[in-house]
Image (spheres, rainbow, N blue to C red):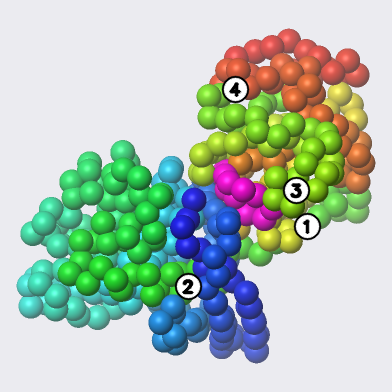
Amino acid sequence: MWKKVAAILAVCLLVFGPGATLFVTVLLVDPAVQSLCLPGGPVTVGSIPDSLTATAADGTTVTLNKTQLSRAATIVTVGGQTPGVGTQGVTIALMAALTESGLRMLANTSAYPRSANYPNDGDGSDHDSLGLFQMRPSTGWGSVAQLMDPSYQARAFFGGAAGPNHGSPRGLLDIPGWQQMTDGEAAQTVEVSAFPGRYADEQPVAEAILAALARPATTDTGLGTGSTPPVPETSQVVFPLPAGTWTETSPFGPRVDPITGQPGFHPGVDLAAPAGTPILAATDGRVIVAGMIAGTGTIEILATVDGKPLSTTYLHMDAIGIGVTVGELVSAGQRIGAVGSTGHATGPHLHFEVHPGGPSTPPMDPMPWLAEHGADGSAPGTVTAAGSGSGSGCSTAN
């Protein structure tokens, strides 16, 4: 959980045609939860604006052009494809690149004249540093050719098991407890800068970049009317989180709200899991909601189960952690997103709902429904063939 999170309080989008400029003003507050969380599979960012203007924590106005925002999109995409990074990790990476290079791929002709032969956004001169994160060949980050590749630099910054440096030098995922550090401290631990206090100033700018690049929310009825084809019968039912990753923290039914302290009704089940844990489609079906709804990362899938309509809802993902789009057909067990903590949440978890009859009908308790269909979460890929009216079938291991 972040110790200090920049919340986006005002976003004004002015569109005047191809030369549109996006102005974003971001103020720092100290909310209990993240304003965004992160992706599971490949990330699709929205269209990249021509310009973005944001206010840093020290009051400095920062204006980024389309080339810089394209570099940011590379970092966001690589982070989204790297397990364990989360939106916190992507934000830290953006803060580091903003500080080190201003989100520019910098050559360094004084140290490596041949670096100018690679695509670049200008020439730097800090020791033998190169690229977005100002990584140095002399300290083991990679060769000149590797470090002039923005995707390589992003993978090296995130590190971890999939990183190109195998933990030396350390990327973000190689640092124990980085999630409990402030974002500025985490960036400094990777960069090892002589000026460690600079990174925190860029946090609100990094948040503004994420807001600008995030795919917008969209909705669709998905009920098979008009030109939309009907949803086929699901072939199986799958527990929405991988086995061994989750703990049930709030069941379906009456409860006292953990944030407001007020009694109410909980229309789904809360399954706590580490941020970034893959979320799986419980059924085959069509995506009818995918985006930020009232500040909460939301996916809703319409299915046909046991010959009847049924919808499943997945909440608390972040905008860039939503791996599907409205109208897309998905398969049971397909990775559709990743656990986050957006919206009404006290920490990373999946809120999962089941609505027999479709999205406008009252919810039912998801856990018995999953168990009845052979998907109790006790084993990876536990599924059952959908029956015809009985709600049961033959269990198979996938």
Q: Is residue 62 left or right of residue 340?
A: left
* Disc 3 residue type (three-letter): Gly
Q: Can you identify the residue that label 3 sits on?
A: 261
First-in-chain label (3 vs 4):
3
- Residue 211: percent from the left, percent from the top? 56, 68
Q: Is residue 218 left or right of residue 247?
A: right
* Disc 1 residue type (three-letter): Thr
* Disc 4 residue type (three-letter): Gly
Q: Can you identify the residue that label 4 sits on?
A: 381
**Foreground residue among 318 and 300:** 318
Instruction: Give the number of the disc on residue 199.
Output: none
How far apart, in angstroms, are the residues tagged by discs 1 and 3?
31 Å
* Disc 2 residue type (three-letter): Pro
First-in-chain label (2 vs 1):
2
First-in-chain label (3 vs 2):
2
- Residue 222: percent from the left, percent from the top? 83, 48
- Magenta region includes residue 345: yes
Q: Residue at x 55, y 77 (%)?
A: 26
How far apart, in angstroms, are the residues tagged by discs 2 and 1?
29 Å
How far apart, in angstroms, are the residues tagged by discs 3 and 4?
36 Å
How far apart, in angstroms, are the residues tagged by discs 3 and 2?
31 Å
